[in-house]
Image: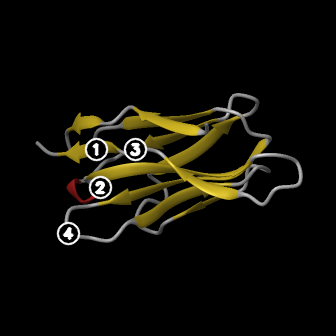
Amino acid sequence: QVQLVESGGGLVQPGGSLTLSCAASGGFFSIDTLAWYRQAPGKERELVATITSAGNTNYADSVKGRFTISRVAGKNTVHLQSNSLIPEDTAVYYCNAQIRRDRYAYAVDYWGQGTQVTVSS
């Protein structure tokens, strides 16, 4: 069974940094795009960053220049390095992976359980 497990959330002061990690496990053939989303209280879930299997990245305007998404080839892991954090970055962060169960299958979305990031002094 495919699982995504996130780690690295916590409490950080404004201007600080955090690195979130997400590891995929279980039986599958490959992972296409990996992404991080976040959801703040009372708001809809929003896309933060994506990275394709070729390493192409895309970021929300609100985090450009501050966040960096990366993936570890061969380890089914994605990281989100978050710098210069501001209170508006406070949210539950979710890992998303488009996973193919076998060579001929369509990619299906899988989600992690979420990790809380709180930016506060």
Tell me: 71 left or right of 16: right
Query: Mark on residue 28?
Result: none
Q: Who comes first in sequence, dot 3 or dot 4?
A: 4
Q: Nearer the viewer, residue 85 or 9?
A: 9
Residue reaching furthest top? 75
Residue tagged 4 = 42
Residue at the spot of label 3: 113
Q: Residue at x 49, y 42 (%)?
A: 80
Q: Nearer the viewer, residue 55 or 106?
A: 106
Pinpoint residue 77: horizontal percent, then vertical percent: 61, 34
Which quarter of the picture shows residue 82?
A: top left
Work out how far the residue at label 3 is from the one at label 2, CA to CA, in angstroms: 18 Å
Measure the C-alpha gap from mark 2 to mark 1: 8 Å
x, y (%) of residue 84? 34, 47
Which one is closest to the eye, mark 4 or mark 1? 4
Mark 2 — residue? 89
Q: Which mark is residue 117?
A: 1
Q: Residue at x 80, y 41 (%)?
A: 29
Looking at the rendered structure, the secondary structure element under dot 3 is loop
The residue mark sitting in front, 1 or 3, is 3
State which mark lies toward you, 4 or 2.
4
* Disc 2 and disc 1 in contact, CB within 8 angstroms: yes
Q: Amino acid at mark 1?
A: Val
